[in-house]
Image (tube, rainbow, N blue to C red):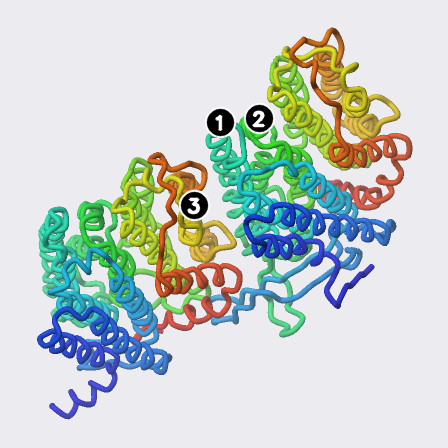
């Protein structure tokens, strides 16, 4: 028994490395309480180690811990996204005023960041419903605390509490769904559930109830409408670095888990391997329609509400809801091309969304404001930052030649391939709407003069500029040369146990 | 026909020279504004020289349109190559450039107008670096649209233009610049997302054999999309005259119609023109509007000949509405620039009507009108710019008697005005005559009704001339100075072209003739093939 566990540990080496790192961070914190440089260094070093191992094991396709965890290309891909996001956020946090204000507990901050990342890394591999629930809770619990990290800020605590209540409720509903599935099939292993369900003896009504309830849990994690109510408040209240992390990594993990659950559990094993790469669902599972409604609601509401926001962080929160809507479009296709499009979108989204939040954080550091009016005249005061933010926003809109276009393009490619023209039209019209509020920030930065007459240039340190460029260059590069990225995503779409 | 400079094809040079210029402009220190101006001028002038070389070497006997063999100055490289995965075919996108008789005049026009725009921007003092950098980027986008033969590449260039244009109107424009800029941006983006969907539907419907692997792959190659044999059986756009083919044609049509702009998608144009600085108005009217009609000729007609024939009458009708509506609106304007903007709507209607005739005269007339309108309207906007620079007003009723005060200026103005009216001996006459001649054969009464637009044009143009240039000069304009050397430099080449093409239109018709014929045959034949079955 112990031997197999130790053997299995080697397959989850990246997670082990992150675990060790977070223990070290906690220990160091005991002796050197306020050393943020040291903490960042340790965190990033550990994550780079995990990143190195992950890139070295591309193509592994196995399970660990008696089928509890899949270690397959799909999980590997998302782990890379999560680890990259964590590295960027760790570096972001180092120069964040909000985080630095809580210097005495800085070790806890990095501990929370790492444990969130760890939970998410397990989430993307979980292939047992119980494991899914546990990992979801693990990442959520750290997120609750992290979003309330700035204890002195009132909205931060409010955000944390709201997040906790919503989270507890949704995961409760999800747990109920899981219990129904267990009652129907007598197992929690998703592959086994699939083979039991495929016999077709389960009550269709129970199945619908169960899938809907499970969808609630996922919907909450990816902040899909109507489970999104926590998102704007939490995103606005939490420290910007944590918001950025939640909007990218947490969403990625939620999507990965959802995609794995749906594909492995509800696919009709008799009808897989269709020539165009799409799958037939088990009869009685109407996921496609549910996802369609969810995605249209999510992007439309996200975009429409974002139009009215004056706080840039809150605007980006609604924008990230809308972005989740576009990604859900890729799921609607229920095919490998749709799934790989979502994965491509996440890589692109990682750079552009983290970039946008980073720029907002840098502005807030100096101007102490996230109000869109305070962005007026920024184009003159901070040219590099403004140009970078403009490019991130254009990329979020999905205009070429930025990477955001490629993300959307792949999604629409898969939709058109599946002949879902109507929903594709809704999608593109939404991106026209989104242009309006993204451009509002750009307009304030470049087209308007600062109201206060403040013209002093904003100063940024060398490493802040470098991090900004690190996020900016891929945003432009993948817009023009995306073949490697697409190929990597298409290769990584493979999950363990599914053809 | 090929032309390489330093082993790089001339079309790549034409397209990316401005980007090189942009990089250099960005590297010049902020204080040296003159250096930035001269750099921009040098690069756009080099572009004009290249365009002239291409024009001279262009083989007038090759058709192009749907045959890759007769495309000239071709450049074909693989750009994106995603290998096949079993469940999803490989994605191959080419960097495919080439020109034929349809694009040659546009390439020349783009180079010329960009250069003139740089000269007319000489007095810009606000953030000079940003201005010229964006102007040069815009130039690249425009040139790229006219030379790319791959739909994906075309789309990238098409969209690259949006952001520079937004800033150029939004930062350097007039009082309501923000409104005009975002309106332009939203309208055009709406059109281009529809274009995007149609492009993707085409992608999945068309496949060709990859010469390298022998594998059947989907393609964005426009020329492959024009061949019905390449459509996969059962794909969404296969067959002829199907529901989805009509839908895709309409989507593409709206995308281009917004750019032209065809009624009722035209409302962004007057706003954009009035608020934009002179040079940007010149580019907008001179080149950007042509992209819409160019797109119809390059993409909509040859790829969807069945739908094009099916919707020929509505198209002609929209052309008619544009002509009359544009002219009537122009007549009602009190703002000089807005008047010219509406006259653009009217004149682009002639292009649409000529194209919709779908015969050689009409098509040739439409193509020539695109070029002529580019030069004439550019002149008109420059003329407005000259007077606005001096008087800081554009109200038609504020002026009078400028003829005596500014004789040289008025001389140029007369050429431009009469060319716009369509006076024989000037270029506008030839293209309008051809368009109406062609259209008369296909749509008799519609053409007769449209020709009334010429009368209206003469009406508002002469009335404007009378109000601004004749009569007595108001006292306050006593110290107006006549046109200066720089302004003459940008106006005289355009005036010469207008006169030369009025006397000897063959110079340009020669270039377009074979391609126009081929295009008409392609659309007509595929349509008769359908009815024959």
Label 1 neighbourhood size at 10 Å, few (<14), some (14-19), many (20+)?
some
Callouts 2 and 3 close, C-beta under 8 Å = no
Q: Position of residue B486 (x, y in %)?
A: 74, 35
Mark linked to residue B315: none
Mark 1 lies on residue: B176
3D distance between C-alphas at marks 3 and 1: 20 Å
Q: Residue at x 48, y 71 (%)?
A: B86
Q: Is residue B203 above or below residue A380?
A: below
SS label for mark 2: helix
Task: Estimate the spatial distance between the alpha carbons at disc 2 and disc 3, rounded to whole Å.
Answer: 25 Å
Label 2 chain ID: B
Task: Find the distance from the CA under tag 2 to the CA under tag 1.
Answer: 9 Å
Tag 2 near tag 1, CB within 8 Å? yes
Which residue carries the number 3 mark?
Answer: A379
List the residue tagged with mark 2.
B274
**Quadrant of the snapshot with the C terminus of chain A:** bottom left
Residue at 12% from the left image edge and 71% from the top image edge: A33
* Residue at (13% x, 49% y) in the render: A153
Image quadrant of residue B328?
Answer: top right
Q: Is residue B295 left or right of residue A197?
A: right
């Amino acid at each position: 028994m112990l031997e197999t566990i130790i053997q299995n540990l080697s397959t989850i080496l990246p997670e082990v490395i992150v675990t060790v790192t977070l223990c070290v961070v906690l220990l160091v914190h005991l002796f050197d309480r306020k050393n943020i440089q040291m903490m960042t260094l340790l965190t990033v070093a550990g994550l780079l180690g995990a990143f190195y191992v992950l890139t070295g094991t591309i193509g592994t396709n196995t399970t660990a811990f008696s089928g509890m965890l899949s270690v397959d290309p799909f999980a590997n891909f998302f782990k890379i996204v999560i680890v990259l996001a964590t590295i960027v956020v760790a570096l972001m946090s180092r120069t964040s005023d909000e985080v630095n204000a809580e210097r005495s507990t800085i070790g806890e901050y990095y501990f929370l960041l790492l444990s969130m990342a760890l939970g998410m890394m397990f989430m993307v591999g979980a292939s047992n419903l119980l494991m899914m629930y546990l990992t979801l809770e693990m990442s959520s619990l750290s997120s609750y605390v992290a979003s309330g990290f700035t204890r002195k800020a009132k909205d931060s605590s409010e955000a944390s509490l709201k997040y906790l209540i919503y989270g507890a409720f949704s995961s409760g509903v999800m747990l109920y769904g899981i219990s129904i599935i267990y009652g129907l099939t007598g197992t929690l292993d998703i592959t086994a559930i699939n083979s039991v369900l495929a016999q077709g003896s389960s009550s269709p009504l129970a199945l619908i109830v169960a899938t809907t309830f499970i969808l609630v849990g996922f919907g909450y994690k990816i902040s899909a409408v109507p489970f999104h109510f926590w998102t704007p408040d939490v995103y606005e209240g939490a420290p910007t670095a944590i918001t950025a992390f939640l909007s990218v990594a947490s969403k990625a993990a939620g999507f990965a888990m959802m995609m794995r659950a749906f594909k492995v559990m509800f696919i009709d094993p008799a009808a897989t391997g269709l020539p165009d790469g799409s799958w037939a669902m088990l009869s009685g599972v109407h996921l496609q329609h549910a996802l369609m409604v969810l995605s249209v609601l999510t992007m439309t509401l996200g975009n429409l509400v974002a139009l009215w926001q004056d706080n840039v962080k809150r605007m980006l929160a609604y924008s990230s809801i809308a972005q989740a809507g576009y990604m859900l479009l890729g799921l609607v296709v229920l095919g490998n091309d749709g799934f790989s499009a979502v994965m491509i979108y996440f890589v692109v989204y990682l750079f552009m969304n983290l970039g946008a939040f980073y720029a907002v954080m840098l502005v807030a550091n100096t101007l102490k404001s996230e109000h869109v009016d305070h962005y007026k005249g920024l184009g003159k005061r901070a040219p590099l930052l403004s140009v970078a933010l403009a490019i991130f926003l254009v990329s979020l809109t999905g205009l070429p030649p930025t990477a955001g276009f490629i993300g959307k393009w792949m999604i629409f490619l898969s939709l058109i391939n599946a002949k879902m023209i109507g929903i594709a039209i809704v999608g593109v019209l939404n991106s026209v709407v989104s242009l309006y509020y993204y451009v509002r920030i750009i307009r304030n930065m470049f087209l308007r003069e600062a109201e206060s007459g403040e013209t002093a240039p904003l100063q940024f340190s060398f490493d802040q500029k470098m991090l900004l460029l690190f996020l900016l260059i891929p945003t432009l590069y993948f817009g023009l040369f995306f073949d490697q990225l697409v190929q990597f995503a298409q290769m990584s779409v493979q999950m363990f146990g599914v053809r | 026909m090929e032309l390489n400079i330093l082993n790089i094809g001339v079309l790549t040079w034409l397209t990316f020279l401005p980007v090189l210029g942009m990089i250099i402009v960005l590297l010049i220190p902020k204080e040296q504004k003159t250096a930035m101006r001269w750099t921009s001028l040098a690069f756009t002038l080099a572009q004009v020289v290249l365009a002239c070389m291409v024009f001279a070497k262009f083989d007038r006997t090759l058709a192009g349109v749907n045959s890759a063999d007769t495309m000239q100055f071709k450049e074909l490289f693989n750009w994106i190559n995603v290998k096949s995965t079993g469940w999803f075919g490989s994605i191959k996108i080419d960097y495919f450039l080439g020109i034929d008789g349809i694009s040659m005049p546009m390439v020349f026009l783009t180079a010329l107008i960009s250069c003139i725009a740089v000269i007319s921007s000489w007095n810009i003092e606000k953030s000079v670096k940003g201005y010229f950098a964006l102007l040069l980027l815009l130039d690249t986008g425009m040139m790229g649209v006219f030379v790319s033969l791959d739909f994906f590449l075309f789309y990238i260039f098409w969209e690259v233009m949006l952001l520079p244009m937004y800033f150029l109107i939004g930062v350097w424009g007039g009082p309501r610049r923000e409104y005009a800029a975002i309106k332009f941006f939203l309208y055009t983006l709406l059109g281009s997302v529809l274009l995007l969907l149609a492009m993707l539907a085409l992608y999945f419907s068309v496949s060709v054999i990859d010469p390298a692997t022998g594998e059947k792959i989907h393609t964005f190659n426009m020329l492959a999309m024009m061949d019905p044999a390449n459509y996969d059986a059962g794909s969404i756009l296969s067959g002829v005259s199907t529901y989805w083919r009509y839908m895709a044609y309409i989507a593409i049509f709206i995308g281009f119609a917004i750019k032209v702009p065809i009624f009722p998608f035209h409302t962004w144009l007057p706003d954009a023109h009035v608020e934009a600085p002179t040079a940007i108005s010149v580019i907008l009217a001179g080149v950007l509007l042509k992209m819409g009609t160019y797109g119809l000729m390059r993409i909509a007609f040859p790829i969807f000949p069945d739908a094009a024939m099916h919707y020929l009458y509505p198209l002609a009708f929209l052309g008619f509405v544009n002509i009359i509506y544009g002219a009537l609106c122009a007549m009602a304007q009190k703002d000089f620039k807005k008047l010219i903007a509406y006259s653009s709507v009217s004149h682009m209607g002639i292009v649409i009507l000529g194209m919709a005739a779908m015969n050689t005269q009409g098509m040739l007339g439409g193509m020539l009108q695109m070029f002529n309108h580019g030069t004439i309207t550019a002149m008109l906007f420059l003329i407005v710019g000259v007077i606005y620079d001096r008087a800081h007003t554009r109200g038609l009723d504020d002026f009078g008697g400028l003829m005596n005060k500014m004789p040289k200026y008025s001389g140029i103005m007369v050429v431009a005005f009469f060319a716009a009216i369509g006076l024989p001996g000037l270029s506008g006459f030839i293209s309008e005559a051809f368009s109406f001649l062609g259209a008369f054969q296909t749509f008799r009464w519609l053409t007769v009704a449209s020709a009334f637009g010429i009368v209206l044009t003469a009406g508002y143009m002469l009335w404007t001339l009378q109000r601004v240039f004749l009569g007595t000069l108001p006292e306050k304009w006593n110290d107006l100075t006549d046109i200066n050397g720089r302004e003459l430099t940008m106006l005289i080449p355009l005036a010469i072209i207008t006169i030369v093409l009025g006397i000897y239109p063959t110079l340009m018709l020669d270039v377009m003739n074979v391609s126009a014929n081929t295009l008409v045959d392609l659309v007509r034949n595929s349509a008769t093939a359908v009815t024959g079955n």
